[in-house]
Image (cartoon, rainbow, N blue to C red):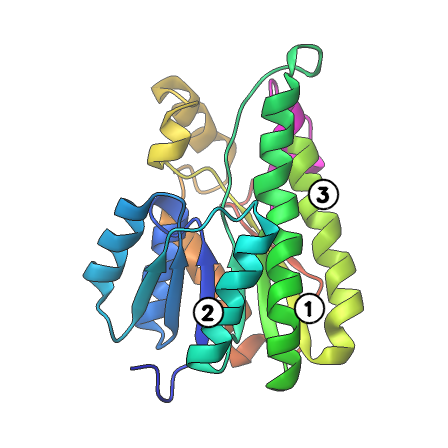
Amino acid sequence: MTEGKKVVVVTGAGRGIGEGIATRLAQDGWYVVAVERDPATGAALAERLGAESCEAHAVDVTDRAAVLELFGALDARLGRVDAVVNNAMWVHYAPIVEMAEDKLDGMFAIAVKAAFWTIQAAHPIMVRNGGGAIVNMSSPAAARGIDGSSAYSAVKGAVSSLTWQAARELGCDGIRVNGIIPGAVDTPGARMVVDDAGYELRAKMNSIGRLATPADIAGGVSYLLSPSASFVTGHLLAVDGGL
């Protein structure tokens, strides 16, 4: 099934940006391991892409033991994990003075801690196979103040810092680590916290004057995982329309 194909694990792959990334990488010839907390959306993606290109696993990426178990099983069955895309995210907008502890903990767990766990799980497999690549999803909010974005900005700032640090630590093992700074994308998850007026404003803020699509963001990920980026590491690639 995966003979001749490199294996990429994509977290939060069931919808939105993650679905776009999984779709593009499958088109590029990768065998995609779609990790999604919701079994239904992951299964639907795997069915659409086909068994020769994708399999889905319902895993809570904030659970270190579960992540290590998944990667161990993939290693035993497939013999390789060549790349990881840390895309999973959950967002709660609130000012600093109103941020609840459970919301803050949840955001750090799914964006930052989960990235630690996937890197820890993938590292020995990649080292044994001569290297690999990791892409983390940051945000423009990591570098600028945005109303109501206190926790999201802090979380994505941590993702950016982790990307640079991991690139430094893992480069000697042949593992490249980069990040994507995506522009605003109209996705089902984002629709829960952004209304039409918010999206209209976001579209006007960049130079191109439209919202990004999941395919736009996936193109950046595709590049960073490709041989064309073999000498690119520790880089945050802005795919934001010139924001």
Residue 172 relative to residue 47: left or right: right
Answer with the quarter of the image where residue 134 lies. Answer: bottom right
Residues tagged 2 and 1 counted as in contact (Cβ below 8 A): no
Taking the spot 79% from the left edge, 66% from the top edge, the residue there is 168
Residue position marked by numbered label 2 in the rendering: 8
Query: Counting other residues with Cα less than 10 Å from the Cα at mark 3, is it few (<14), some (14-19), or many (20 or more)?
Result: some
* Residue 192 percent location from the top left of the image: 38, 24
Residues tagged 2 and 3 counted as in contact (Cβ below 8 A): no
Amino acid type, mark 2: Val
Residue lying farthest top? 98
Q: Is residue 215 above or below residue 146?
A: below
Q: Say which label, 2 or 3, has the lower sequence index.
A: 2
User: Which stretch is magenta?
Assistant: 138-152
* Residue 186 percent location from the top left of the image: 36, 36
Query: Counting other residues with Cα less than 10 Å from the Cα at mark 1, is it few (<14), some (14-19), or many (20 or more)?
Result: many
Distance between the alpha carbons at the discs numbered 3 and 1: 17 Å
* Residue 44 percent location from the top left of the image: 22, 52
Q: Which mark is residue 112?
A: none
Front of the two marks 2 and 1: 2
Amino acid type, mark 1: Thr
Residue position marked by numbered label 3 in the rendering: 158
| Residue 85 appears in the figure | yes
Answer with the quarter of the image where residue 86 lies. Answer: bottom right
Taking the spot 75% from the left edge, 74% from the top edge, the residue there is 171
Query: Counting other residues with Cα less than 10 Å from the Cα at mark 2, is it few (<14), some (14-19), or many (20 or more)?
Result: many
